[in-house]
Amino acid sequence: MPYVNIKVTDEDVTKEQKAKLIAGGDIITSEVRAVSAKWV
């Protein structure tokens, strides 16, 4: 299983934006691995 590490500074970034980045990492990982995002 790949490991994705997303680091974001606290400067001008909302919790919602951080959550979108994390969700996007899950989606792209599942697309590349061709598996369901619910298993990532």
Image: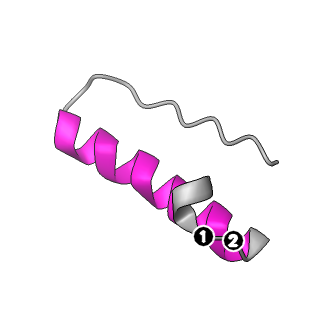
The residue to which callout 1 is attached is: 36
Of helix, strand and loop, which one carries label 1? loop
Answer whether residue 14 is magenta in the image.
yes
Q: Are marks 1 and 2 in contact (CB under 8 Å)?
A: yes
Q: Position of residue 2 (x, y in %)?
A: 79, 48
**How far, Cα to Cα, is label 1 from label 2?**
4 Å
* Residue 10 visible to the viewer: yes
Where on the picture, by quarter, is residue 26? bottom right
Q: Residues within 10 Å of mark 1 (few under 14, many from 20)?
A: few
Specify the segment rendered in magenta: 13-32
Q: Main secondary structure of the magenta part?
A: helix
Of helix, strand and loop, which one carries label 2? loop
The residue to which callout 2 is attached is: 35
The residue depicted at 20 percent of the width and 34 percent of the height is: 15
Q: Position of residue 38 (x, y in %)?
A: 52, 59
Q: Is 8 on the left-hand or right-hand side of 6? A: left
Q: Position of residue 35 (x, y in %)?
A: 69, 71
The residue depicted at 29 percent of the width and 22 percent of the height is: 10
Say what amino acid the circle numbered 2 marks: Val
Q: Position of residue 9 (x, y in %)?
A: 38, 25
User: Tag count in the figure?
Assistant: 2
Answer whether residue 22 is magenta in the image.
yes
Q: Residues within 10 Å of mark 2 (few under 14, many from 20)?
A: few
Q: Is residue 8 above or below residue 38?
A: above
The residue depicted at 64 percent of the width and 67 percent of the height is: 30
**The furthest residue to the top:** 10
